[in-house]
Image (tube, coloured by chain):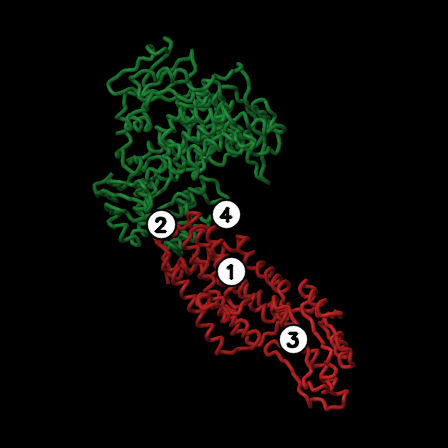
Amino acid sequence: MNDAGPLARVLGLGKVFAGASAAALSEISLDIHPGVVTGLVGPDGAGKTTLLRILAGLLLPTSGSAQVLGHDPAKEADTLRRLIGYMPQKFGLYEDLTVLENLNLYAELKGLSGGQRTETFERLLAFTSLNPFTERLAGKLSGGMKQKLGLACTLLGTPKLLLLDEPGVGVDPVSRRELWQMVHQLISEGNSVVWSTAYLDEAEACDEVVLLSQGRILFSGPPKQLHQRVEGRVFLLRDDTDAPRATLRKARRDPASIDGVVQGKSVRLIARPGASLHPDEHGIGPGAQLGPTPPRFEDGFIDLLGGVSAAESALALAMEPKHVADGGVAISTRALTKAFGDFVAADSISLEVRRGEVFGLLGPNGAGKSTTFKMLCGLLAPTSGDAEVAGVDLRRGRAEARQRLGYMAQKFSLYGQLSVEQNLEFFAGAYALTGRRKKEAIARMVEVFEFQTYLSTKAGELPLGLKQRLALACAVQHGPEILFLDEPTSGVDPLTRREFWTHINGIVERGVTVLVTTHFMDEAEYCDRIALINQGKMVAVGTPDELKARAVSAELPEPTMEEAFIALVQAPAAAELEGAA
Amino acid sequence: MRAIRRLAALVKKESLQIVRDPSTLLISLLFPVILMLVFGSGINQDTTQVRLGVVNLDGSPASVRLVDTFAHTPGLHLFVGSSIEDLGDRLRAGRLQGFVVLRSDLGRRVLGRGGAAQPLIEVITDGAEPNGANFVAAYAQGAIGVWAREDAAQRGLAPGSGFSLEVRSWFNPSMRSQNSLLPGSVTIIMMVVGALLTALVVAREWERGTMEALLAAGVSRFELVASKLIPYFVLGLLAFTTCVTMTHLYFAVPLRGSLSTLYLVGATFLFSALGIGLLLSTLLRSQYDAAQAALNAAFLPALMLSGFIFEIRSMPVVIQAVASIIPARYFVTAMQTVFQAGDVWSVIGRSLVGLTAAAVLFLGLTLLKTRRRLE
């Protein structure tokens, strides 16, 4: 960092959109320093994009002021646009143009021509490793390559400040790591970067972080500062005599705990400041080991929010335990394949999910998770291969199987124009509940999820946390044996995510089988077993701890889930290369 | 110089998108061909067979000759009835479009006997179908005229010593309704194609998120609008050429004016049609909404209020005022004039003024409504 003063300064900034009841941003004051990566971190709807757009001169603030590189974006947008590079969320690429045509367009718009352009293109194409793909249509690039091309287009005018809106979304772990390497290289060349993200693990890679929640700044400073808040208060508890979910449930009875999640075979706990954890007093076996662990950004975030209530899942408590035949199989597939034309979206997937387990499909966007998922739900007919779900052969009794499973689609597909009650009624009908059973089921959901005061509120107007609850209620009210969750917590704040998983853990303990897709590496650790999916193929299956153990090497003695993913994905490629040579 | 290069880059981008997007090419190249075939073959105001009844209550040689003349008139499908009541019933049932009554004193009147000077022939038509009724009247009059001349000649009177009636239709002497309908159809087709082409393009940038990137790159309003206008203008001219070629060569509608006048009028009109599409796309920012709105805003007024089918002068004053701001109205007049009458500058000049005003209005509004921010 240097003493040149901030690159951008925001003072008391507020933004209220016409017709909106709540402010998108209120009283935002922050400095963006030169030569660093500033992370703009927060869940969906926190106001990240609005703030970036105001800084780029694309939106006008309702109150307060901003200075970017000495210019007011509200008044001098044209001057400013030449000095900054702004990359919007959807890349701003033309999908029906090739890589080179996209670059040419933005080069002309930024006034780059002749030898200067040739030189810049060479440098950027090498930098982004897009050289072999210059003639490929941008729409045919993978998520990671699109982001790299977007970044290259943004870098064309040699901007002093880069504003990148969620560049890590939809990117596989390998490309995401490369994107970060590119950003660090840019920083070392004297650039400054603002990187917005909903992924808390990305926040840790930033030099400075501005944490936004509901349009307000919750924290700003180096991420280490947030770690320091919870330093010495984060522990891993491992009890091999019990399931981690049961251990978590018991451990959270300890009033000294303010947060807890499953992490592989262990449970991650945060202690209240000044208090110490006593798991043995809450029914956890004497053989359990409790040890400190380094804090993560998420731990600090949770602490900042005052911790998570320890209430057990009311949903699980209201549910009859299901008979779990030991070792019974809920889902099994043999060489399940789905091809769309030449493109094989899911290639010969064979897996077995036991009753009463949480099974995760982990992989980047476009890996084939959702395709596999939809085949198992009976929403998509497989091209070849077999699958049995809840004892029903998918080729014969798809409708029959559907009654016995619940499905929660991405982004909680609720009917926004219908009220909470109408949504519950519709989904009850869709899962063939009728008469008294339907009435009872809805009444139970209303009680369990405390919908009483919201019954006539339109689903589209609910706050995010309640939407999540309603989506879950709609999927479980008919008492399914198997619950399918497609990216259930993407973009959701950590408190909502905790509440959601408390319910999931609760109903799994009652015997429900859960199949979940996710691209969050830490969410994968909530699962009993995970299958890593990449480019339509299943790369590996195992418990989170096993998969991490398989990736251990001299350089990586303690790999994270993401590092394990990268190592396991690259291993077969490396083997192929060796075979070819 | 820099500005021209930026505009050129944007136009190139737009053109590449056009070439790679089959739907745009379909709208501009195939759509006009299909619509021309539909309009040219499907819509036809000519009545080829008139169903006419006749009752002869007289029986004199003159009246028999008249019935004979009717029977031999091409275009008439004759039914000889026995009584007025019988024919009246058939008319009410829709089986006849009209009938002719020859009263019992016709022969005497023709010969000038019985004190009555003028022969009287009654023609009754079905007024519920005015178009058909006009045809019946015209055909009946024509046949009676032929008969009257022949009758006079037979009785030794010099032809032409009585009166003779000759109807001549100017501008469309063969009375092919296609000659006036097809130039009018071109208007509707160009209106729909023009508005639809541009309705999608600005909204598409919003939907795909590329607008944000363009704005962030500092693209100006003028560059934005011009880069959309230029490539689609070229496509529109191609569509226009298709329409004109088919009208003239395939449907054999004579072109009396010059090609340059035709293209001057067509190009001016194109700007207003493209302008409507651009304006809707800019305002609505959704491809679906903009396409729906463009179809309604382009097709219906062009069909109903352009004078293509319904005579504007016979509309209520308020509707006439509405019609006066519809560019298609000026284009219909200009097209029909250039095709059927020639380069009549007194008419075309007025149309050009109307078309230019419409183009300036829609494109001006588009520029005004083009925002350089996201709200």
Q: Please state which amino acid type lies under the numbered disc 2.
A: Leu
| Same chain letter for marks 1 and 2 | yes
- Relative to B354, B248 lies left or right: right
Snapshot quadrant of residue A318: top left
Where residue B280 appears, x then y in whole percent? 43, 56
State the CA–CA distance, disc 4 to disc 3.
66 Å
Res A383 quadrant in image: top right
Which residue in the structure is indicated by mark 3? B138
Q: Are marks 2 and 4 in contact (CB under 8 Å)?
A: no
| Structural distance between the alpha carbons of marks 3 and 1 | 33 Å
Q: Which chain is displayed in green in the rendered image? A: A
User: What residue is shown with label 1?
Assistant: B300
Measure how far apart labels 4 and 1 are at the Cα level: 39 Å
1 or 2: mark nearer the eye: 1
Secondary structure at badge 1 equals helix
Query: Mark 2 = which residue?
Result: B374
Above or below A508: residue A412: below
Q: Position of residue B10 (x, y in %)?
A: 43, 57
